[in-house]
Image: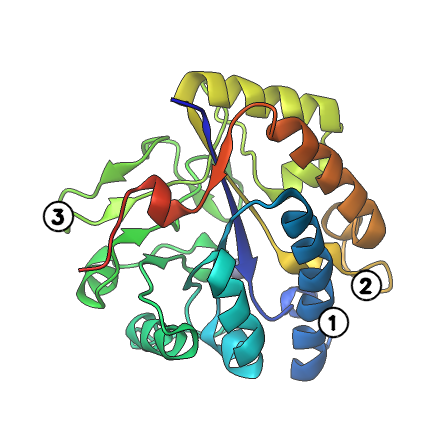
């Protein structure tokens, strides 16, 4: 079987400057994501590849038509209701709001910032899978070095857990910050090693990374590259990846069908 490539994007309001004490109005948070999404969609449709978009229902409510049209080609999954605040009821409510907007069943959930969540709530809300684990050690955020690297069933809920990819052995995270900050050939080398070992790869980025972020007072390792440089780098990366496998959505990869 061909190697399966899962590109996932957290489609959320761009609230990240708030973490660094920088004010950004709600409307601007949405606009930045929209700018980035437009550029990203251009690249994905240029290569005709499907992806999975974990979307906050706050973002989706403000962009109903856009999210509905994304759902025609890509999988829409839930990224809770808001990126910056959380109530347990948001897990279920975001699912029904996204289902109303897309007219399709929503199978997957990812908690903002990969925060630890009670899987029984995700199961109870009717999701088929969770994707809120990066099985690595990020100082100050989480230590998931004992979590499995590959897809597994959670023992108590039987929910499918699909972790973000990390390299074999040293578990180097292959997430968005590595893509930005490592030399591209080295990042590609780590991805290829992972694909050989796992026969699949699961990466995550954000549409706002494709918008121009240089004017924001946030650290360079987060905002550089962004905009056109990010698009160029991502385009080069996709051109290499597509020689090595097939792109698919998470629900297709897990063979989840509506009941
Ligand atoms: Zn997020």
Residue at image position (74%, 71%) is: 22
Looking at the picture, does residue 247 appear above or below residue 82? above
Q: Mark 3 vs mark 2: which is more N-terminal? A: 3
Q: Which mark is residue 217?
A: 2
Residue at image position (54%, 58%) is: 10
Between 164 and 235, the residue placed more toward the observer is 235
- Disc nearest the viewer among 3 and 2: 3
Secondary structure under tag 1 reads loop
User: Looking at the picture, how far across and down is residue 171, in whole percent?
Assistant: 48, 26
Q: Which residue is mark 1?
A: 22
Question: Marks 3/1: CA distance?
Answer: 41 Å
Looking at the picture, does residue 71 appear above or below residue 137? below
Residue found at the very far left of the displayed protein: 156
Classify the position of the N terminus by image quarter.
top left
Question: Marks 1/2: CA distance?
Answer: 7 Å
- The type of colouring in the image is rainbow
Q: Mark 3 vs mark 1: which is more N-terminal? A: 1
Q: Residues within 10 Å of mark 2 (few under 14, many from 20)?
A: few
Q: Which mark is residue 156?
A: 3
Q: Residues within 10 Å of mark 3 (few under 14, many from 20)?
A: few
Question: Marks 3/2: CA distance?
Answer: 43 Å
Q: Is mark 3 within 8 Å of ligand 1?
A: no
Q: Can the viewer see residue 75 in this picture?
A: yes
Q: Are marks 3 and 2 in contact (CB under 8 Å)?
A: no
Secondary structure under tag 3 reads loop
Q: Can the viewer see residue 83 in this picture?
A: no
Residue found at the very far right of the displayed protein: 215
Direction from residue 113 to residue 162 in the image, left or right = left
Q: Are marks 1 and 2 in contact (CB under 8 Å)?
A: yes
């Amino acid at each position: 079987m061909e190697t399966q490539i899962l590109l996932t994007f957290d489609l959320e309001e761009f609230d990240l400057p708030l973490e660094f004490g920088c004010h950004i109005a709600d409307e601007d948070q949405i606009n930045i994501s929209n700018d980035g999404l437009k550029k990203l969609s251009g690249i994905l449709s240029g290569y005709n590849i499907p992806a999975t978009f974990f979307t906050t229902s706050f973002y989706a409510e403000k962009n109903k038509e856009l999210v509905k049209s994304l759902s025609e080609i890509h999988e829409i999954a839930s990224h809770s209701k808001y990126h910056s605040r959380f109530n347990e009821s948001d897990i279920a409510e975001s699912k029904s709001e996204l289902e109303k907007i897309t007219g399709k069943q929503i199978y997957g959930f990812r908690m903002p910032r990969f925060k630890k969540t009670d899987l029984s709530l995700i199961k109870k809300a009717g999701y088929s899978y969770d994707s809120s684990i990066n099985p690595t050690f990020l100082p100050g955020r989480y230590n998931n070095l004992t979590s499995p690297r590959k897809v597994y069933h959670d023992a108590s809920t039987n929910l499918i857990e699909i972790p973000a990819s990390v390299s074999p052995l040293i578990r180097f995270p292959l997430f968005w910050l590595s893509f930005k900050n490592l030399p591209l050939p080295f990042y590609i080398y780590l991805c290829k090693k992972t694909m050989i070992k796992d026969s699949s790869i699961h990466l995550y980025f954000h549409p706002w990374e494709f918008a121009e972020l240089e004017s924001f007072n946030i650290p360079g390792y987060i905002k550089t590259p962004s905009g056109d440089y990010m698009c160029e780098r991502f385009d080069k990366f996709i051109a290499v990846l597509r020689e090595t496998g097939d792109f698919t959505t998470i629900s297709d990869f897990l063979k989840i069908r509506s009941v």
